[in-house]
Image: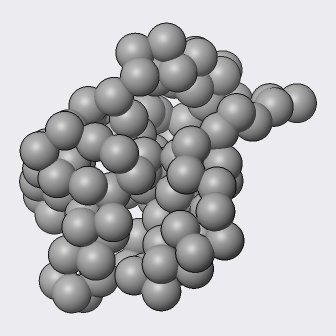
Amino acid sequence: MQARKILLVEDEHGLVMTLTDRLSSEGYLVEAVSEGDAGFGRAVAEHFDLIILDLMLPHSSGLDVCRDLRQRGIKTPVLMLTAKSLVVDKVIGLKLGADDYLTKPFEMM
């Protein structure tokens, strides 16, 4: 069985390492990029089973990336992972195409 691939678009190095280690230990292949435009490029170029997308990124916001992916017809599930926790932020993220929205800090079980 082929491992599921996750694209992690996050600019906090410590969080990237933690998530990559944890997801890899669960059998996922994780590719991480730290800028919004790089995340968009990778998501367009290759199939991923999930995109974990920070909201506040250099070069292109997670909201822009998510919207642009949906406009391109890319239906890969997107989990927004962000410190922006206001209800309005969540509504905007979901309306722009995110499938779920998780606020930082969060706890891994």
- Looking at the picture, tell me which residue is in the foreground, 11 or 47: 11
Residue at point 40%, 15% (across, down)? 13
Q: Could you say which quadrant of the image residue 27 lies in?
A: top right
The answer to whether residue 109 is above or below residue 61 is above
Inspect this view and state whether residue 69 appears. Answer: no
- Looking at the picture, tell me which residue is in the foreground, 52 or 85: 85
Residue at point 24%, 67% (across, down)? 64
What x and y, as percent, mark residue 93? Answer: 48, 72
Q: Could you say which quadrant of the image residue 45 lies in?
A: bottom left
**Residue 6 placement, left or right of 28:** left
Residue at point 38%, 35% (across, down)? 10
Inspect this view and state whether residue 78 appears. Answer: yes
What x and y, as percent, mark residue 83? Answer: 56, 43
By what rule are the colours in the image chosen?
one colour
What x and y, as percent, mark residue 98? Answer: 49, 73
The answer to whether residue 69 is above or below residue 26 is below
Residue at point 33%, 57% (across, down)? 62
